Structure formats: structure tokens, C-alpha cells
Image (cartoon, rainbow, N blue to C red):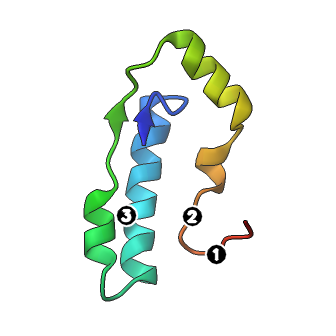
Amino acid sequence: MLYPVPSKEVGEKLVKRLKNEALQVFPKVGQCIADSITLEEWNGSPEEHTKYLSENQNWWDEETFMEPSHD
């Protein structure tokens, strides 16, 4: 995850939730997946971040390991 996600608080909650979900959904490799989920600082410009959020609205609420992907 890149902070600001839209905020550090949302990013921390999302990382925690995805780590817990990985452990539940993937019993054999969940710990490896959970360990790879981190919150990193966004190094782009504020304009790039605003553009990213406008193009990917609410992705942080929709991302989960619990439901199959519909891609």
C-alpha cells in the first residue's frame, strides 16, 4: 500500500485487514502473503496522488482476499 492511501489511518487499517484475511484464506502460505503486505510512503507529487485517487476511487474499500476476483 502506498501512503497516503487517502490517509495513513486508512492505509494502516487496510494493511491490518488484508494481513488477517491472508492468514484466513491461505492456510499454507498466508503468513508469507501477510508479511509482504506493507504500508509504504507515496513518493509522487500531490497532483499525481490526486489523479491516482480520482482514477481508482474507493479501491481501498473494495480490495479483499475474502471474495473471488471478478476481473
Which residue is painted at 33% across and 68% down in the image? 33
Residue 40 in percent (x, y) is at: 33, 36
Query: What residue is shown with label 2?
Result: 64
Q: Amino acid at mark 2?
A: Thr
Quadrant occupied by the C terminus: bottom right
Q: Please report contact status of discs 2 and 1: CB closer than 8 Å, yes or no.
A: yes
Q: Quadrant of the N terminus?
A: top left
- Residue 21 placement: quadrant: bottom left
Q: Earlier in the sequence, mark 2 or mark 3?
A: 3
Identify which residue, 18 or 52, lies in the foreground.
Answer: 52
Q: Tag 2: Cα neighbours inside 10 Å, few (<14), some, or many (≥20)?
A: some
Tag 1: amino acid: Glu
**Crowd tier of the residue under label 3, counting other residues whose Cα lies within 10 Å: few below 14, some 14–19, many 20 or above:** many
Q: Nearer the viewer, residue 12 or 55?
A: 55
Instruction: Looking at the image, tell me whether mark 3 or mark 1 is earlier in sequence order.
Output: 3
Q: Which residue in the protein does label 3 denote?
A: 19
Q: Position of residue 3 (x, y in %)?
A: 42, 31
Q: What residue is shown at x 72% (from left), y 27% (from top)?
A: 54
- The residue that mark 1 highlights is 67
